[in-house]
Each structure stands twice: as C-alpha cells, then as structure tokens.
Image: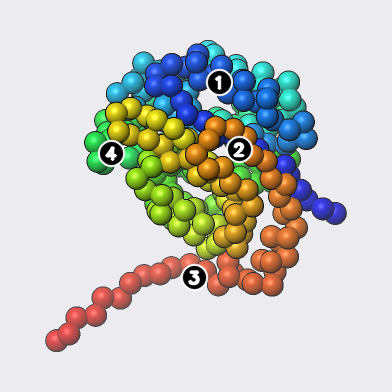
Amino acid sequence: MEKEVNISILQMSSTIANVNDNMSKVDTIIKDQLPSNSDMLVLPEVWTCGWDCKSFIESAQNFNNSSIISFLQNIAKTHHINIIGGSIIEERNGKYYNTCPVINREGKLIARYSKNHLYSYYGCDEGKYISVGDNPVMVNLDGINYGLSICYDIRFPEIYRAYAKAGADILVNCAAWGSNKPIPWEMMTKSRAIENQCYMIALTQCGHIKGEEYNLGESRIIDYKGEEIVSINKIEGIKTAKINLNNMYEFRQKCTILKDIKQSYEVKVLCEV
C-alpha cells in the first residue's frame, strides 16, 4: 500500500509587529495558491510578527485565547488540512516562547514545540526576550511522524538524531533565516536529511526585515538522500510536493545506516607522556 502525503510550504515576507496584516497575507496566499488536495500546510518562523526580537513581546499571545490559533484552526477546518504553524510568540505563565503550534484537520490544537536553541548573536538577542523550550516534540499526523524544530535548532544535529531514533519520517525546520548565510542553510538542512535518512522540510521567510537586513528565502523540501524535491527562490507563495514514504522505507532497508549508530561515543583523550 502506497504511503503518500501532499505537503505545501508557504514562504512569505512578514510585516514587523503587525499580526493582522500578516494573517491577512497568509489568508490571501492560501486562497490563491493552496492546492485542493494538500494534506499538510507548513508556515515559517515568526510569520505573525517578523524577525525583530524587540517587538516579540508586543506581538505575543496566550494560546488559550489567541486570534492566531483561531485563524489557523479555521484554515484547517475549511481546507480539511493539517497545519504545522511555523512559530508564534507565545505567552505562557508569565514567560514568552517561540512556539510552533500543530493543528489537525478538524481544527484541534494537538501539539506545540517551543524553540530549544535561541539565537543571540550578531545583533540578535532572542534569548533576552524568549525562554528556552523544554524538549523536542514529534507529532503523528495521518500515520506520519514529524520531528519539529525552529531555525537556529538546525545547528544542533543532536535534536534530529533524537528524532530519527524515535522513528521520525519527516524533519521540519521553520525559520526566519538571514540572507547573509545561504551556504549554512543549504548544507545543514540537506545534511540533517541525509544523516538521518528522513525527508526534510526547510522553510524560511523571504524579503526585507529592516534596514539592511533581509530574509534568505530559498525554502526547500528535501528527500532522504539530500535531493531537492521542490524549492522556492526569493518570492512569496506556496509550493507543494507529493512525498512517497515507501521509497524512504525501502532505502532504509537497503542502506541500514541508522542501525549502525552506537549507544555511546565517549571520547578517549590520549596525552603523550
């Protein structure tokens, strides 16, 4: 029996600190471009407010009464589609998190993943405003396991290896990746797919941020051998790919790399006497 899923990735340029404008843009793109047979919609990191750490808190919402969550739930129910909602600045118990909500076809919020690694370099200070998430989260939708991650998490292969060991089929990284780092984005996203024999959704924002800062664009869906299935250049819009999981399972049976992982890689340090 074929195990297939149609995955749509939505690349966009967000307006800084304007949640309503950004929801309106997503709504327009979906109405114009979302295929009727899509099973999964994936959004980029902080699509609701753009990458501007200083404005994160004013854009934050509690998921219990969030207009953003309600917006995504309506999309899920209207289009009968699962949604990995990029990330939203979430207020929870007096703290703030960069959180990815997951909503099923019936519009139910079934999971959330809060970013485990916060980017605070080269003028960015995410860690000043945002608290670190507790642990990785893998969610099962229509029988497929998705391992969730956000942007800077891609630099930490340990989280993706943990997903592979837990049975991930598809790895997801929702990002707002800077345009001055195209090589790390391409190399690391493809490496995570290859080394874990998983499909990889690597989705980032595009367009202007502020001043001389720009998002990269260059979103991709990558197969378990590191080959691009679909990609979006610098423009806003949706691209959709049909993924056949059986091909990946057959490849894993022929090339059993994951079974060769040792339980421990303790390093022996040898000193010359």
* Of pointers 4 and 3, the one earlier in the residue sequence: 4
Residue type, mark 4 in image = Ser
Q: Is residue 102 left or right of residue 162?
A: right
Q: Quadrant of the C terminus?
A: bottom left
* Of pointers 2 and 1, the one earlier in the residue sequence: 2
Residue 25, numbered label? 1
- Residue at image mark 2: 9
Asked if the residues shown at circle 2 and circle 1 are in contact, with their CB atoms under 8 angstroms apart, the answer is: no
Asked if the residues shown at circle 1 and circle 4 are in contact, with their CB atoms under 8 angstroms apart, the answer is: no
Nearer the viewer's eye, disc 1 or disc 4? 1
Asked if the residues shown at circle 3 and circle 2 are in contact, with their CB atoms under 8 angstroms apart, the answer is: no
Residue type, mark 2 in image = Ile
Residue most extreme to the left: 273
* Of pointers 1 and 3, the one earlier in the residue sequence: 1
Q: How far apart are labels 4 and 3 at the CA level?
A: 33 Å
Number of other residues with Cα within 10 Å of mark 1, as a class: few under 14, some 14 to 19, many 20 or more: some
Q: Is residue 129 left or right of residue 31?
A: left
**Residue nearest the observer in this picture, 117 or 41:** 41
Residue 262, numbered label? 3
Q: Quadrant of the N terminus?
A: bottom right
* Of pointers 3 and 2, the one earlier in the residue sequence: 2
Residue 120, numbered label? 4
As drawn, 129 above or below 172: above
Residue 193, numbered label? none
Residue type, mark 3 in image = Lys
Number of other residues with Cα within 10 Å of mark 2, as a class: few under 14, some 14 to 19, many 20 or more: many
Residue type, mark 1 in image = Lys
